[in-house]
Amino acid sequence: MKNATILILLTLLLVPLQAHAQKIFTSDQILERSPDFGSYWYRGLAELNRYELQQVRYGEIHPGESVVIFVTEDFLRDKQVKYEFGDGKNKTSILKTHHHRKFWTGVYPYHIHTSAFVPVDLDEPSLKLAFTSTEWCGVVYAQINRNSDGLRSRLHSYFQAEGDQDKQLPAVEMEDALWSRARIDPRKLPTGSFELLPGMHYLRMLHKPVAAYPVSASLKSSKSQLVYTLKYGTLDREVKLFIEPTHPFRITRFEETYSPLGAAQPMTTVGVLKKSVMLDYWSHHGLKDAWMRGEIGLSE
């Protein structure tokens, strides 16, 4: 009876938009109905992407799960928070990325979360980055805000050598923000040689200084996919995003190659897209909504 009830619910949720107020549906279904950027991203829903993760840590490959969420919202440029009330003259529309990684190392788990706040108008630079890493040894968290002088970076760590940091960085782009930029228009991703703030998860796991590093970026195009590659010469690190060549430009795979702590040779973290749905997840926080985790394929 329970399975039959779930099947009925799924059938109702996946019927055409004009018949019901749809709550959860795949990106393919939206693309068939409304390929336009505005009608895809501005319907009060977030896009949830679940990746099967093979994460490099301690010189080994650890299986895990990565969930990447994209959602639009109005954002205040000056206070750099979500616009909710009051004077909205200083607001801009952003495509926000939440990237959550979960994996186990032996007996204890890692939870790594990065949020990037990127204006939909690609003439504007990314505005903010927030980061947390929690595991059984402690917590590291950071926030990076764009200001008139570049980027203000604040880091708090339980490691003595890192402690509490507050410093100014040059006005560079942030690697974590490139995920949103790729979803807006991958053909406008920056290419050539320039400086970039690497992914915060990488800097923390290898205990690298939060700083701008030289990078060489390229974008290769084929009928089946776009491949965006970042090569950090001084870090001996390479990142690849595999992107659908047409709207909504889903990122179907990501790779990150470097020499981790505990390994003499480079190893590669891989994330492979397994499920992509649109969902107002903030409205589904009750026990009655738990069945959706299985539909999306989320682990317990």
Image (cartoon, grey):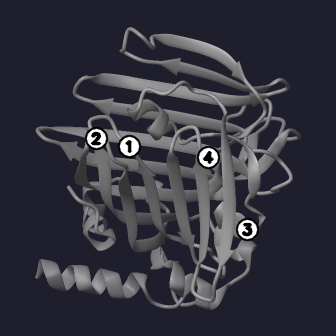
Mark 4 Cα-neighbour bin, 10 Å: few <14, some 14–19, many ≥20: some
Q: Is residue 2 visible?
A: yes
Q: Are marks 2 and 1 in contact (CB under 8 Å)?
A: yes
Q: Are marks 1 and 3 in contact (CB under 8 Å)?
A: no
- Say which label, 2 or 4, has the lower sequence index: 4
The numbered dot on residue 185 is 3
Q: Are marks 1 and 4 in contact (CB under 8 Å)?
A: no
Q: Residue at x 41, y 32 (%)?
A: 206
Q: Are marks 2 and 3 in contact (CB under 8 Å)?
A: no
Between label 1 and label 3, give the one nearer the viewer. Answer: 1
Residue nearest the observer in this picture, 49 or 226 = 226
Q: Is residue 79 visible?
A: no
**Distance between mark 3 and mark 4 Cα atoms:** 15 Å
Q: Residue at x 53, y 61 (%)?
A: 240
Between label 1 and label 4, give the one nearer the viewer. Answer: 1
Q: Residue at x 63, y 84 (%)?
A: 222
**Distance between mark 2 and mark 1 Cα atoms:** 6 Å
The numbered dot on residue 263 is 2
Relative placement, left or right, of 110 versus 274 is left
Question: Which amino acid type corresponds to the residue marked 4 in the rendered image?
Answer: Glu
Q: Quadrant of the C terminus?
A: bottom left
The numbered dot on residue 259 is 1
Element on which disc 3 rests? loop
Between label 2 and label 3, give the one nearer the viewer. Answer: 2
Relative placement, left or right, of 52 versus 96 is left
**Distance between mark 1 and mark 3 Cα atoms:** 31 Å
Question: Which amino acid type corresponds to the residue marked 1 in the rendered image?
Answer: Ser
**Distance between mark 1 and mark 4 Cα atoms:** 19 Å
Element on which disc 1 rests? loop
**Distance between mark 2 and mark 4 Cα atoms:** 24 Å
User: Looking at the picture, how far across and down is residue 272, in whole percent?
Assistant: 38, 68
Q: Which residue is mark 4?
A: 175
